Amino acid sequence: MGVGLTCELISLIALSVWEAGWSQVAADREAVANPQNTAGRFEPAEGIVHPYLGFVRRPRSASEAGLPFGVSEYGFPDNETPLVVRQPNEIIIAVLGGSLAEEFARHGWDDLREHLQDSESFRGKRPRIVRLGLSGYKQPQQLLLVNYLLALGAEFDVVVNLDGFNEVALPDVENIPNHVFSAFPRGWHVRVMDTDDIQVLRKLGNLVAIQDADKARTKSFSHAPWRWSPTASVVWLVLHRRSQDQELHAHHELQTLGDRGEVHAALGPAQSFDSKESLYRHCVTLWKNSSRLLHATCQQRSIRYLHFLQPNQYLPGSKPLMSRGEKAKAFQDEYPGRNAVEHGYPLLQQAGKDLITEGIEFHDLTQLFQETVEATYRDECCHLNETGNAMLAKRIAETLIRRP
């Protein structure tokens, strides 16, 4: 009995010293166990190739997912159709972007709605969200998505575009190394690969097995009595980190196999860059042009367009007060997208200033956590915890309330 209590006490201290505390590790564990949490995960069984948007998610009901909402027939994480029409005393807010936007629309929406309803300018109006963020999306997918839905009859009052990370990181880390056109969707050559190739299927199966095993193990640790044990939390954390490393390696192997057939449908136009900087500049130009076109489309239909550059922990100086616990969880020196953030984000920031001079409502959120001591990032990529999403919701709400 005494030995067990001693182990629990030591584990509790370790989690407080080396992580963000037991409660935060427990929250992270619950997030991983949540079947709706798909950010950063390659989903061959869930992803469906789309003729205009690259890919969407496999439709499923809320009951099938075992969650408050499922995936609509249009392939986005929502119970309702995105083809909404304006109603009296209602304001329709579409949220675009990649996994950060997808998670924000799920976890930050209640905070955003509350802030809006408490304001004088939104009093008497019911905010309604249209969730259009999807893990892995990058421009021009958001641009094509809005035009596609508007062509089908959708009506929006506000379009919130929350992006930036995928636009510079994914072409650098995934597309160009695999000879895939930089503007093509994430993992495109893998999505249209020859499934008769046994080596590809073997690598794909290995990746899915790693992800499923980690999910199942995490779910077990989320049950009593293990969920109440600091020692069990330490064990889970070690095993989860090992699974993350294995998943990263398996994903790299799969991406490498994807270019074995020189098929134009998978690779697109030949493209090369003489330096990383030239690649980032190309990606930023595409990002800026897409935002310009989104603004023009929205302006023509009396839709307010707001473009936000998402925060990221790898931008130097953006979170100088990051604790040792948060850094251990959310910052890796060798993270694949770090170089793209360090060198691509300054280009995004400058391009954002250009958008402002053109009359576009652009807002740089990279310094959102500059004075925050509390943990805001939940993983080594870019995703936010409850505190981070709440702060993001508050800033976006303030921008919505404050007319230009």
Image: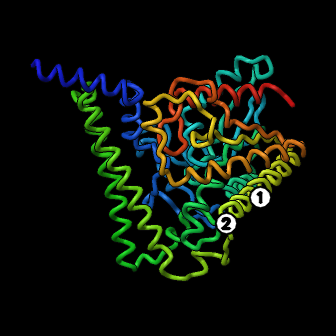
Earlier residue among tags 2 and 1: 2
- Determine whether, in the image, residue 30 is placed left or right of residue 326: left
**Callout 2 amino acid:** Ser
User: Which colouring convention does the figure follow?
Assistant: rainbow
Residue located at (36% from left, 35% from top)? 29
Above or below for 118 versus 401: above
Residue 365 or 82: which is nearer the viewer? 365
**Callout 1 amino acid:** Thr
Quadrant position of residue 403: top right
Q: Residues within 10 Å of mark 1 (few under 14, many from 20)?
A: some
Above or below for 284 versus 327: below
Quadrant in which the N terminus is drawn: top left
- Determine whether, in the image, residue 150 is placed left or right of residue 29: right
Can you identify the residue that label 2 sits on?
275
Q: Position of residue 363 (x, y in %)?
A: 76, 37
Q: Position of residue 34 (x, y in %)?
A: 40, 39
Residue found farthest to the left: 1
Q: Position of residue 332 (x, y in %)?
A: 47, 45
Residue located at (60% from left, 31% from top)? 109
- Determine whether, in the image, residue 225 is placed left or right of residue 16: left
Residue 261 in sight here: yes
Above or below for 83 versus 253: above
Foreground disc of the pair 2, 1: 2
Can you identify the residue that label 1 sits on?
285
Q: Position of residue 323 (x, y in %)?
A: 48, 28
Residue located at (76% from left, 52% from top)? 150
Quadrant in which the C terminus is drawn: top right
Residue found farthest to the bottom: 262
